Amino acid sequence: MKIRASIFLTVTTLFLGSISPALAADAIPTRADQVAAIQSQYMSVFDSQFIRLNALAKKAMTYGPTKAQYKSMLLDFNDVRRLISDGLVSEVSDLDALKAYAAEETGEFAISIPQLEQMVASIKTITCLKGKSSKKVTAIKPICPKGYVKKK
């Protein structure tokens, strides 16, 4: 009987000793705290990506295919940013889903913006001459139209 009691006492002591009390740090953060954390983590990333996109605007608009891709990316970027901002303001939105969406989209833009930058960097403009008339041709691999000669 004493052996049983000592085993019971030992097991109970080990069990109770391994339970840690709840601390204030373990408390669930408020919605405002979660919103602030998401904003501090992702909004600065979105801001820097937006600056990079705006820096490409002028040169991207000179060539049709890059112009279309730039406009499409900018539209997508603005939609994503608006959706996340509206979700953070809303009292009923799922913050975990918004955080996951922000992480996914910032990752997507982190890949697609450098690709667009590379495309824009490869755009070249040449001047083509035909008699006294000249024509500027802008493309990734520009060639003069028939009858025109590249200006040297």
Image (tube, rainbow, N blue to C red):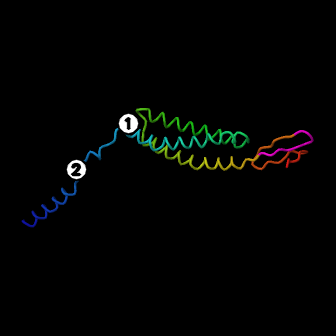
Which quadrant, please, contains the N terminus? bottom left
**In the displayed structure image, the side of residue 128 where residue 22 appears, left or right:** left
Q: Predominant secondary structure in magenta?
A: strand
- Residues at badges 2 and 1 in contact (C-beta under 8 Å)? no
Circle 1 sits on which residue?
32
Question: Depth check: 31 or 57 in front?
Answer: 57
Tell me the residue at 64%/50% (across/down).
115
**In the image as oriented, which residue stretches furthest toward the bottom?**
3
Tell me the residue at 56%/36% (across/down).
79
Q: Earlier in the sequence, mark 2 or mark 1?
A: 2
CA–CA distance between discs 2 and 1?
26 Å
Magenta extent: 125-133
**In the image as oriented, which residue stretches furthest toward the left?**
2
Amino acid carrying label 1: it is Ala
* Mark 2 element type: loop
Q: Name the spot of residue 31 as percent of width and height, x first.
A: 37, 37
**In the displayed structure image, the side of residue 98 where residue 33 appears, left or right:** left
**Eye-nearest disc, 2 or 1:** 1
Could you classify mark 1 by the number of other residues whose Cα lies within 10 Å: few (under 14), some (14-19), or many (20 or more)? few
Amino acid carrying label 2: it is Pro
- Give the number of the disc on residue 21: 2
Determine which quarter of the picture holds residue 146. Answer: top right
